[in-house]
Structures are given as structure tokens and as C-alpha cells.
Image: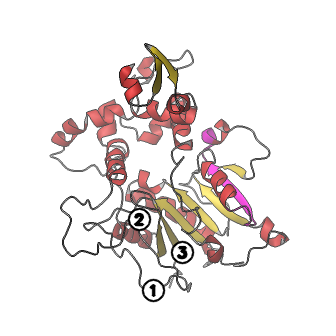
């Protein structure tokens, strides 16, 4: 108990007397509790869970992947994994399914994952925060949003593709209530079914597999948050090309918004940390990366890191569980270019945070 006090999980009110804290109370909520279960905790078998033989490991999802990395790398002569179905996760769990096939086949773990993702961004900065991404200025069809305009109200403003249980759309509504237009959440049928039934949630929920053609045509924005970093390049190309016809119908007004990590390449800065010219014709709107500008001193700081620890730790996590990696700016531009898009700008949300990449469809010449 003394250690739990030292880590602020409980508080000591007297000799051998303890009480809960905000942290321990948070762990009673599924969206925080299940993040711990997903990463670290041995999960007990609930009565409704299939026999353990159906679950290659009785431990959490991520733990066996991290524990087996040394053995996996030794087996592959220390080559990084590049196949979503062959890496530390498969080695640790002794199966040949991708992480998402694993979760889909095991609803118990799938529910834990969905709960975890619903609280993933709580308390962090976001591209939706004031002063980061000038969304009202990027509305191609109606740069002067009018909530009383019926056409604008009925048009689709944003489609959150693979948006889980709607956590980002709730944040968007709270921070941009004045923007007219419909909001649509898309995810797999199993995820949509897990959402509470709430007729006042302010957005539409639609079952959709993002590996198949996008059914909502001509929306202003298509949002992918923490989607593409889960997949290798061939899979990402399928996702992006499945979206492309929907954007092409309203090009160049329709925009793709990718909210993901952009890994810096150089000590203390990324490639093109601050753009020297405006993007999309908007003056005085510098496009910045997710790291600070180049230090004023020409002498490198020997303790400086090329990327902050939240990015590098997520890079390890993605290798351990999804057999992929976080991408640099150059890798993002290359991937999007191959899929038929052009990057219009990158807006950073702070050191160690994700960045927002805006891209548009390139007309076929």
C-alpha cells in the first residue's frame, strides 16, 4: 500500500488507513481501466468467455508481444517486421492472425480495445483546439460557414473513418459547435454495436469497413485518426485508394485529414519544420511540424532527442503489436503520393503529440 501511495494510486489518511484518489477512481471507468488491461494485466476468464484453448495466451494483448521481441529479432537476424501477420505479436501469441483479426475473433478482447481507444486522447492537445488547424478557412465549398444555411446544414461536414465509439466527434462538436453540416462516424459493425444508444449524440453512426469503397461521397473532410499507423504500406494504400473516389467527386473541396505521429528525422527538428510559404493561399498560416523549430544555438545539445519519448515509445508499441512503425514526413508524403494524394500542409499539436496532415486528391493527368 505504501508503494500505491507513492504513485498516487491511493492516499494514506492515517496509520494503515487509505482512501481512493482521482487516479484510482479513474481506473473504475472502462475507458481507463481497459487501457491497463490491454497493455499489462493478466486477464481473468469471465463466465462468458470461450475456453482458454481459444485464447492462445491468457495474458493481456500487448505483454506477450513485448516479452518476445528479443527472441523474435534473433530469429529474423534482427530485421524489422514488415508483414502485419508475421511479427512479435504472432510470435508471442503463437498464431498467424493480425492484431485486428485477433481482436475481431475474440469479442472479449475487442471490447477492451474499444474501451481503451475511447479514452486514449483524454487530456491531450488536439488539432481541434483553437489556434492549431484553421478549419473554418479550409472549408472549400463554404469558407463562410452559416448555421442557418440549409444547404450547409444538410451537407456532410466530416466523416470520421474508423472513429471507434465517437470520441473524436464528441470533441469536435464541443470545440466547433458553430460549423454547420452533418457528422458521420464509421467503424465496424461490432464497434458500432458497442456504442450506447443515444439519440442526442449529434452525429450519425454507420457500419463501414475502410478497406472497402467509401459510401459517403463528397464530404468536406474525411478524418483518419490513428488508423494508418496500424498498417503496413500495402494495406494503407488499399485504405487510401478506397477513399479516393469519394474525395474526387468534390475535388479539391474534399480534404483528407490524417491525425497521426510524424517522426522527426534530424536532431531537434523535422524535415521542413516550418514552411516558408503559405499553404492553400492562406496568408500568415505557417505549416508547422510536431516538434519545435531549429534551436537558436548552432551547437547541438548532446541530450536532445530527434523525437520525443511519446513518439518513440509508440513506435516500439506499433512494432511489437502491429509489426509496423511510425512514419516520418518523407514517408507520409511518399505513401500519400503513391495513393494519388498531395500533402497540402502539416499542423503540429506540440512536442510528442500527433500532427494533422491535410491532403487532397491529385487529378489524373
Give how far across and how far down residue 309 sits, in percent.
32, 51
**Residue at 56% in and 54% down:** 210
75 in magenta = no
Residue sitting nearer the eye, 229 or 56: 229
* Range shown magenta: 176-191
Q: Which mark is residue 360?
A: 3
**Residue at 28% in and 66% down:** 268
Q: Which mark is residue 108?
A: none
Residue count near mark 2 (Cα–Cα under 10 Å), binned few <14, some 14–19, many ≥20: many
Give the number of the mark in front: 3 or 1: 1
Q: Image quadrant of residue 165?
A: top right
**Residue at 29% in and 39% down:** 88
Q: CA distance from mark 2 to mark 1?
A: 18 Å
186 in magenta = yes
Q: Earlier in the sequence, mark 3 or mark 1?
A: 1
Q: Which residue is mark 1?
A: 277
**Residue at 55% in and 39% down:** 114
Q: CA distance from mark 3 to mark 2?
A: 21 Å
Amino acid at each position: 500500500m505504501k508503494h500505491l501511495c507513492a504513485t498516487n494510486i491511493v492516499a494514506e489518511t492515517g496509520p494503515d488507513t487509505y482512501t481512493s484518489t482521482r487516479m484510482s477512481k479513474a481506473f473504475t471507468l472502462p475507458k481507463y481501466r481497459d487501457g491497463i488491461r490491454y497493455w499489462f494485466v493478466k486477464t481473468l476468464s469471465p463466465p462468458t468467455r470461450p475456453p482458454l484453448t481459444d485464447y492462445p495466451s491468457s495474458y493481456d494483448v500487448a505483454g506477450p508481444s513485448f516479452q518476445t521481441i528479443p527472441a523474435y529479432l534473433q530469429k529474423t537476424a534482427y530485421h524489422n517486421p514488415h508483414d502485419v501477420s508475421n511479427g512479435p505479436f504472432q510470435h508471442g501469441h503463437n498464431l498467424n492472425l493480425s492484431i485486428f483479426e485477433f481482436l475481431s475473433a475474440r469479442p472479449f478482447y475487442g471490447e477492451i480495445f474499444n474501451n481503451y481507444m475511447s479514452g486514449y486522447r483524454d487530456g491531450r492537445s488536439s488539432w481541434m483546439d483553437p489556434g492549431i488547424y484553421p478549419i473554418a478557412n479550409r472549408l472549400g465549398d463554404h469558407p463562410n460557414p452559416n448555421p442557418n444555411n440549409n444547404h450547409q446544414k444538410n451537407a456532410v461536414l466530416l466523416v470520421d473513418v474508423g472513429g471507434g465509439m465517437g470520441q473524436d466527434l464528441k470533441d469536435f462538436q464541443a470545440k466547433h459547435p458553430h460549423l454547420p453540416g452533418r457528422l458521420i462516424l464509421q467503424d465496424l459493425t461490432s464497434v458500432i454495436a458497442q456504442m450506447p444508444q443515444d439519440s442526442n449524440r449529434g452525429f450519425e453512426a454507420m457500419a463501414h469497413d475502410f478497406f472497402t469503397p467509401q459510401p459517403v461521397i463528397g464530404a468536406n473532410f474525411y478524418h483518419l485518426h490513428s488508423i494508418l499507423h496500424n498498417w503496413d504500406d500495402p494495406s494503407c494504400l488499399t485504405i487510401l485508394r478506397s477513399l479516393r473516389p469519394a474525395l474526387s467527386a468534390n475535388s479539391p473541396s474534399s480534404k483528407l485529414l490524417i491525425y497521426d505521429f510524424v517522426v522527426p528525422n534530424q536532431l531537434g527538428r523535422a524535415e521542413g519544420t516550418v514552411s516558408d510559404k503559405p499553404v492553400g493561399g492562406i496568408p500568415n498560416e505557417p505549416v508547422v511540424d510536431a516538434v519545435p523549430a531549429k534551436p537558436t544555438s548552432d551547437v547541438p545539445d548532446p541530450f536532445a532527442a530527434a523525437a520525443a519519448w511519446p513518439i518513440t515509445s509508440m513506435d516500439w508499441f506499433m512494432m511489437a503489436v502491429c509489426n509496423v512503425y511510425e512514419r516520418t514526413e518523407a514517408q507520409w508524403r511518399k505513401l500519400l503520393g503513391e495513393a494519388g494524394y498531395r500533402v497540402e500542409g502539416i499542423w503540429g499539436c506540440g512536442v510528442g503529440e500527433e500532427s494533422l496532415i491535410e491532403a487532397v486528391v491529385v487529378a489524373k493527368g
